[in-house]
Amino acid sequence: MTETNTKKLHLTAFMRPVSLHTGAWRYPGAYPDANFNLQHLKSFITKLEAAKFDAFFMADHLAVLNMPVEALKRSHTVTSFEPFTLLSALSVVTEKIGLAATASTTYDEPYHIARRFASLDHLSGGRAAWNIVTTGNPESSKNFGRDQHMEHSDRYKRAREFYDVVTGLWDSFADDAFIRDRESGVYFDPDRMHVLDHQGDELRVRGPLNIARPIQGWPVIVQAGQSDPGRQLAAETAEVVFCSPRDLASAKELYADIKGRVVAAGRDRNHLKILPAALVVVGATVEEAKAKRLELDSYVHYDSAIASLSVSLGVDASKFDPDGPLPTELPDTNASKTSRAGVVQLSQTEGLTVRQLAQRYGGYSGLAFVGTPETIADEMAVWLAEEGADGFTVTFPFLPQGLDDVTEKLVPELQRRGLFRKDYEGSTLREHLGLPRPPNRFFE
Amino acid sequence: MTETNTKKLHLTAFMRPVSLHTGAWRYPGAYPDANFNLQHLKSFITKLEAAKFDAFFMADHLAVLNMPVEALKRSHTVTSFEPFTLLSALSVVTEKIGLAATASTTYDEPYHIARRFASLDHLSGGRAAWNIVTTGNPESSKNFGRDQHMEHSDRYKRAREFYDVVTGLWDSFADDAFIRDRESGVYFDPDRMHVLDHQGDELRVRGPLNIARPIQGWPVIVQAGQSDPGRQLAAETAEVVFCSPRDLASAKELYADIKGRVVAAGRDRNHLKILPAALVVVGATVEEAKAKRLELDSYVHYDSAIASLSVSLGVDASKFDPDGPLPTELPDTNASKTSRAGVVQLSQTEGLTVRQLAQRYGGYSGLAFVGTPETIADEMAVWLAEEGADGFTVTFPFLPQGLDDVTEKLVPELQRRGLFRKDYEGSTLREHLGLPRPPNRFFE
Ligand SMILES: Cc1cc2nc3c(=O)[nH]c(=O)nc-3n(C[C@H](O)[C@H](O)[C@H](O)COP(=O)(O)O)c2cc1C
Ligand SMILES: Cc1cc2nc3c(=O)[nH]c(=O)nc-3n(C[C@H](O)[C@H](O)[C@H](O)COP(=O)(O)O)c2cc1C
C-alpha cells in the first residue's frame, strides 16, 4: 500500500440539510423536510464518510435569517436542527469523519463553548472542530437582550480573548490527570488540574472546566472571517480557514495573505489549511452540468430573487424585462463597482436573461465548479498546485443527488489522480488534516 | 391486551455514568471510566429502555463541584459528558425512552436553551424534557464573569420569566406553518410565525426561534427546587418534580403541598408528577442488600467522608473514635437539630460506627430503598397509594450491577403487580407520563 507523494486535497462538506441553495427544496428528488429528518442526515454523512471526506460542517445562525419576508417564506433555510445536538447524534453513526460545529463568540459564554466542544470530542473519539464566528447578522442581538449588535472590531477583540479562554479551559486537566487508582481511592491528581483564573478586558472566567482534556488536546479551530481582523484572527488561531473567494486570482491573493500572516505570527504555514467554499455541480457533460444548474436556479422565485440582483447591481432591477438580456446602459451607482462588474460579466459569459441572473443571485452566486468529474478535477488540481487552496469546503447544489454525484463520480476521479485519500490513515480529525496535537500549556 | 386500572408508577433514571455515590467507582465490577465511555452509557440506556423506564435523566453542574480537594480528588463526579451532547448521541440508539437534560436559567440564554431542547425533541421524535435549575453552586458564578452568585430569590424570579420566554419561543411557529408547497414555491406561511418581542424585568428576547415547534409542542418541564420559591415555580410550570424527601411522612407533606399549589394555580393536579429521588439497592435477601450497601459505603475514604458527618452533626466528628459508636453525649450546636437527630437515629437503627456513619454521609445519605424486589415493591406501592409519590427518580448504587438488579429483578416484580407498564403505549415522553400536549399560545 504505497501512497504517492502528491500533495492532496482536503475536503469538508458545508452542509445545509436541504442545500445552501435557496431553490434546492423544489428540485426533483429533493427532500424538502430534511431540516428535521435525521434519517436523511444519517444517510448524507454515511456517504460522505464512505467517500473519506475530512469533515462534515454545520453553519449556524442565531436568528431567523434577515431577508424580506417574500424571500424568507420561500426559503428552507429558515429553520433546522441546532449544530451540537445534530452532530452529537451523527457522531454515533460514524467512526472517522470530522464534525465541525459553528459557535459564536459574541452571543455565548466560553465556559459553555469549551465544555460542549470537549464533550463532542470525547463522544466522537477526537473528531470535533469549532468554526469560530463573531455572528454577522445584526438581528441576533435582539434575541440576546441587546438593542445593538456589537461593533465589528469589538466582536473580533472579544473573539480573540474568547479563544484564549476556551483553549485555556481545555487545558484544565493534564492528559494524565485521571489516575483512577482503586487501591488508594484517588480518582484524579489535583496537582494535574489547573485553575485558569482569566481576568481580561472582555471576559472573566475562573475554571477549571468540569470535563477532561479533549481527545485531540483541543478540537480543531476553524475560522471564516474575511475582513482584516478576520484574517488576523485566523492567522493567530485557526487551523482551517473557510473562505469564499470569487475566482482563482482572488483566492491566491487571500491564500498568500493568510499564509504570510501565519508565518509572521510564528506558526508553521502547513498548520493552517485554506479551504474555499465551492458549489460543485457534476454532469456527464459540461453542458449537462450547466443545464442542471440553470434548472436549479429556475426554482428560485423571481419575486424573491430580483431584490438580490438589485443589490448587486446597485439599481432597481425589477424595472427591467425579466426575459430580456441585461440592459447595456445602466444608471450610475454608488454601490460596489466590483459587484456590478461581476453581474455584467456573468450576463455576457453565460448569456443569461435578467430573470436567470436574478435567480443566480437569489440562489447561490459564490464560487462554483460546474462540469464533468474530469474538468472539475482539472480545476481543483490547478487551485491546489497554484496555492489558491489546500482543498475545498464543498457545498452541494441539491440533495441527495448532488451529493451522490460528488461522492460517486468526482471523488473517485480525484482518488485515481492521487489528489484525494483512498482511506483514512488516522482516526482523529487532526490526523486527517495533518495537524499536530497541541501541547497543554500548563503541563508537560 | 387489557391493562388493569391500577394506578401505576413512573420511573426515571437519575444518571451519573459511574453512579451518584462517591465510592461507586471502586465497587467490584464498576466502570471507573464510564464518565467518558459512550459504550457504557449506550448499554445503560438500552437496558433502561428495555425495562420501559419513562426517562433517562442527566443532572448538570456549571463548575467543578465545591468540595474540599481531599474529597474532590477521590470522587468520580468531577467531570463527565455535557448533557446535550450526550443525550443527543443516546437519542440515536433508543426509540422510546425520554431524555431529560438539566439546564440553568441563571447562567444561560433563553434563546439557546429553547433552541437546544427543541432540537433534541425533533431529533428524538418527541422525547426531550428540561429540568429547570437555578444552579445552587456559588462557584459557578466565577465561570461566567460574575463575582457573586445571583441571590436565591432573584434566581427564581429570573427562572419564572425565563420559562415564559422559552415556552413563548417554542410557540414561534404554528404546528402547520411549514407547508412546503413545491408548486407555488412557498416553504412556510409567514402568517403562522409569531415574533415574541418579550420585554421583561430580567430578559429581552425578540424571536422568532429559528426552529420549528417541538414535536411535543413543548418538551416536558421538570423542576427540582425544594425551597418555597422552588415549589411555587414547580406548581406554576412543572410537569414533573424531582425532589428528595427523607421519608414517607415528609414526602406526603411535600406531595400535598405541591399538588395544592398546582390546583391553586388553576392547573389539573394530574398534570404534575412527583418523583422523589431514591437510591435503590436490590438483594436476594434484605440482609444481602444491606451488606451491599455497607460494602459500597466502605469505598468512601474516611478522610473525605468525616467532613460530611461533621456538617450533619454540627460538631467536629474527626475527634471521635472511628471504629466506636457515636458518643451518646454530643456538645451543643447551632446547626440544624433535625439533621443531627437524623444521624443519631441512623446510628441507632443500623448500629453503625462513626466511620460507617461518615461513609454513609460522604457516599449517599438521601432516601434509599434497600431490600428484595418484593420488599421494595411493597414500599413503593405504599408510597404510591398514600400519595407520597407518583413514581421515583431512581438512582443506582453502582453500575452496571446495581442497574441490572433494578431492571432485571425489581421492574419485573413491579410489572407482575400491575404497578409498572409492561410496554410503552405511546412514543413521546408526554405520552409515557400521561401529560397533554400544550396548545400553541399564539395559534389555534
Ligand atoms: C464557508 C463560510 C461559512 C460561514 N459560516 C458562518 C456561520 O455558520 N455563521 C455565521 O454567523 N457566519 C458564518 N460565516 C460568515 C463569517 O463568519 C464572517 O462573518 C463573514 O465571512 C464576514 O467576515 P468578517 O466578519 O470578517 O467581516 C461563514 C463564512 C464562510 C465563508
Ligand atoms: C433529584 C434532584 C436533581 C437535581 N439536579 C440538579 C442539577 O442537575 N443541577 C443543579 O444545579 N441542581 C440540581 N438539583 C438541585 C435543585 O435544583 C435545587 O437547587 C435544590 O433542590 C435546592 O432547592 P432551592 O434552590 O429551591 O433552595 C437537583 C435536586 C434534586 C432533588
Image (tube, coloured by chain):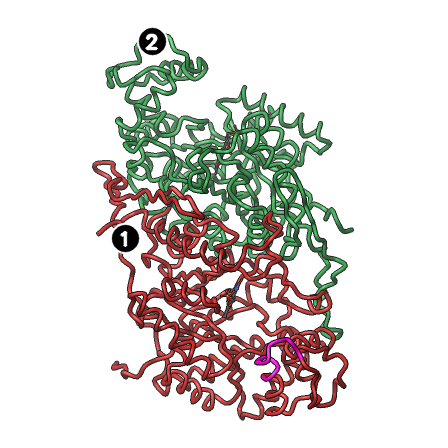
Chain colours: A green, B red
Residue type at mark 2 is Leu
Depicted B52 relative to depicted B143: above or below: below
Left or right: A15 as drawn, with respect to A208: left
Depicted A214 relative to depicted B417: above or below: above
* Residue B166 place in picture, x, y as percent: 39, 52
| Pointer 1 and pointer 2 on the same chain | no
Q: Is residue A170 magenta?
A: no
Residue type at mark 1 is Arg
Mark 1–mark 2 CB contact (< 8 Å): no
Residue occupying image coordinates x 42% and y 79%: B253
The residue wearing badge 1 is B441
Query: What number is the disc on residue A263?
Result: none
Range of residues picked out in magenta: B333-341
Left or right: A366 as drawn, with respect to A253: left
Query: What number is the disc on residue A330?
Result: 2
Residue occupying image coordinates x 70% and y 67%: A187
Pick the residue in front: A328 or B382. B382
* Residue A396 place in picture, x, y as percent: 42, 37
Q: Which chain does the residue under circle 1 lie in?
A: B
As drawn, which residue projects farthest toward the top?
A329
Q: What secondary structure is found at the residue carrying circle 1?
A: loop
Depicted B270 relative to depicted A155: above or below: below
Residue occupying image coordinates x 45% and y 48%: B202
Q: Which chain does the residue under circle 2 lie in?
A: A
Quadrant hosting residue B287:
bottom right
